[in-house]
Image: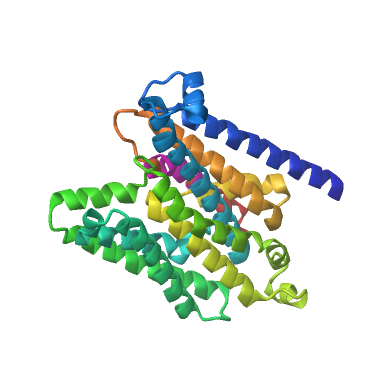
């Protein structure tokens, strides 16, 4: 039985990996500039500075890389938090990371720092994410339960959202307010390798921390007392889950804005396919999240190529109906 399940997991990951590679290649070939596919790939691999090579290497390639990295981050962190909190409705924004990072970016726009120093926006977003998770940790305490962590995350999210709304309300001019709103909607347009280099180190560290949670999450399915009896440190598990999510999701929000529902939807779709094992769900959700966000980023360029449809809007349009279906399913399963 275990060998059969293992083979099925390998096939699932191989299929998801193939889908990610295929969508990544399609993402490279889709854009407002109508370039022949073979010419585009040739320019990407062996171009010598002509217009096509510049488009492929400086515009499309970093955008596709960011879509892959951010999708993997959201899927992985969603699976890790759902496993740690044992809550099917958990997602990265639950512990205040997304709202705190968004507040940092909004302050950069509001104060005008983003105009004086372009990297001020992602750097302040990263700072906001780290500050938010420190506050959550301080409120929740080192050895508190999951309910306290959730309540602390909700409190920080509410405060950060309120401060973001205040910044919008007091915005010095309508153009700044419009820029804040557009950034909050989430997008990968006009991103460069500078954004990739800024986000990649934090995401990689976060991935390593979250990937190490597999055994602990499997044990937590038996309950905290049983997991502790098996040698699992609950405090260490919480620390890795929270810090890993803060680093990776904070970096994602810093370079792309708020993109919701990926961390909620992807683990739910894949959980039955991995036998409801949290350790296997981590890798599967990372691949699934990368595939979903690559597909969504292709969609925003295909559905409304001249309208600048925001990535976060499309993921919300797709994710919100799934969320409603999930609520209905949960109600039906209640005694």
Q: Which image quadrant is residue 136 in?
A: bottom left
Range of the magenta residues?
312-323
Q: Is residue 271 left or right of residue 128?
A: right
**Labels in figure, total:** 0
Name the residue rendered at 70%, 44% in the picture. Answer: 273
Q: Magenta part mainly helix, strand or loop?
A: helix
* Residue at the extreme front of the image, as rendered: 48
Q: Position of residue 264 (x, y in %)?
A: 52, 51
Name the residue rendered at 69%, 61% in the picture. Answer: 214
Q: Which image quadrant is residue 99 in?
A: bottom left
* Residue at the extreme left of the image, as rendered: 173
Q: Is residue 312 left or right of residue 227?
A: left
Quadrant for the C terminus in the image: bottom right
Q: For this rendering, which residue is in front, 87 or 4?
A: 4
Q: What colour scheme governs how the chains and residues are painted in the rendered image of this protein?
A: rainbow
| Residue 320 magenta-highlighted | yes
Q: Position of residue 323 (x, y in %)?
A: 49, 48
Q: For this rendering, which residue is in front, 139 or 40?
A: 40
Q: Is residue 210 left or right of residue 299?
A: right
Evaluate whether residue 214 shows in this view. Answer: yes
């Amino acid at each position: 039985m275990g060998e059969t399940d293992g083979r099925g997991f390998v096939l699932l990951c191989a299929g998801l990996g193939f889908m990610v590679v295929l969508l990544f290649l399609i993402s490279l070939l889709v854009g407002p500039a109508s370039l022949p596919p073979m010419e585009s790939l040739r320019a990407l691999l062996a171009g010598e500075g002509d217009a096509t090579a510049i488009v492929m290497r400086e515009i499309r390639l970093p955008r596709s890389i960011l879509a892959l990295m951010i999708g993997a981050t959201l899927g992985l962190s969603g699976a890790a938090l759902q496993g740690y909190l044992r809550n099917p409705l958990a997602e990265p924004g639950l512990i205040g990371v997304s709202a705190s990072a968004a507040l940092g970016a909004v302050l950069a726009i509001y104060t005008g720092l983003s105009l004086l120093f372009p990297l001020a926006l992602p750097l302040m977003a990263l700072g906001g994410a780290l500050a938010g998770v420190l506050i959550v940790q301080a409120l929740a305490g080192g050895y508190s339960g999951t309910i306290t962590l959730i309540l602390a995350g909700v409190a920080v999210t509410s405060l950060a959202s309120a401060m973001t709304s205040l910044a919008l309300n007091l915005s010095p001019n309508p153009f700044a307010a419009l820029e804040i709103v557009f950034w909050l909607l989430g997008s990968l347009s006009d991103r460069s390798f500078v954004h990739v280099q800024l986000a990649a180190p934090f995401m990689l560290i976060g991935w390593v921390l979250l990937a190490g949670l597999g055994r602990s999450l499997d044990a937590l399915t038996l309950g905290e007392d049983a997991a502790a009896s098996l040698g699992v440190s609950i405090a260490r598990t919480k620390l890795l889950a929270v810090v890993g999510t803060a680093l990776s999701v904070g970096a994602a929000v810093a370079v792309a804005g708020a993109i919701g529902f990926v961390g909620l939807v992807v683990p739910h779709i894949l959980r039955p396919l991995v036998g409801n094992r949290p350790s296997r769900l981590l890798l599967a959700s990372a691949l699934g999240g990368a595939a979903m966000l690559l597909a969504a980023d292709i969609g925003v360029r295909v559905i409304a190529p001249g309208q600048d449809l925001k990535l976060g809007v499309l993921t919300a349009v797709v994710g919100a109906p799934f969320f409603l279906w999930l609520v209905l399913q949960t109600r039906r399963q209640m005694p």
